[in-house]
Image: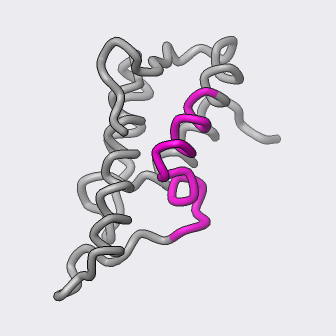
Amino acid sequence: MQSTSESRLMFDGSKEEWVIWNMKFSAFASTNDFMSQMIGLEPVPNRFKENLNDEELGRIKRHDLGFAELLIAMEDRKNSLLIGRSISKENPRGDLRLAWERLEKSINPKT
């Protein structure tokens, strides 16, 4: 299920809003079946492989949906660029796991 612009979970980039937004976006990711890819538990199939089966195509589609939702949710320029520049060889148009990892480190760095 894709969200509409009225119900998107927008993030202003503030540390004060991070905990609540993180919980809400994680719930959204779970209900839209891209949470396991977002946190690195489920790898994204190689999109450049020939003869992808329906399951692999579905996982790629969920990954791409998750990346798009994460990018669209960013209201501030800094985090928009951080997410948008999270690319990898496997996902040259956006890597959801890498983007989530970078966002978490940026907002809530572990010391």
**Residue at horizontal 63 percent and vertical 30 percent from the top:** 22
Decide which of 101, 24 is in the foreground and name it: 24
Q: Residue 16, position in %: x, y?
A: 69, 12
Asked whether 48 falls inside the magenta stretch, the response is: no
Left or right of 20? Residue 49 is left
Identify the image quadrant of the N terminus.
top left
- Magenta stretch? 24-42
Residue at 37% of width from left, 55% of height from top?
62
Image height of 88 relative to 108, above or below: below
Residue 61, above or below 31: below
The image quadrant of residue 49 is bottom left
Residue 34 in the figure: left or right of residue 87: right
Residue 97's x, y, as percent?
Answer: 50, 55
Residue at 31% x, 22% y: name it.
Answer: 4
Quarter of the image that includes the C terminus: top right
Q: Farthest residue in the right direction?
A: 111
Would you say the magenta stretch is mainly helix, strand or loop? helix
Task: Indicate whether 47 appears above or below 102.
Answer: below
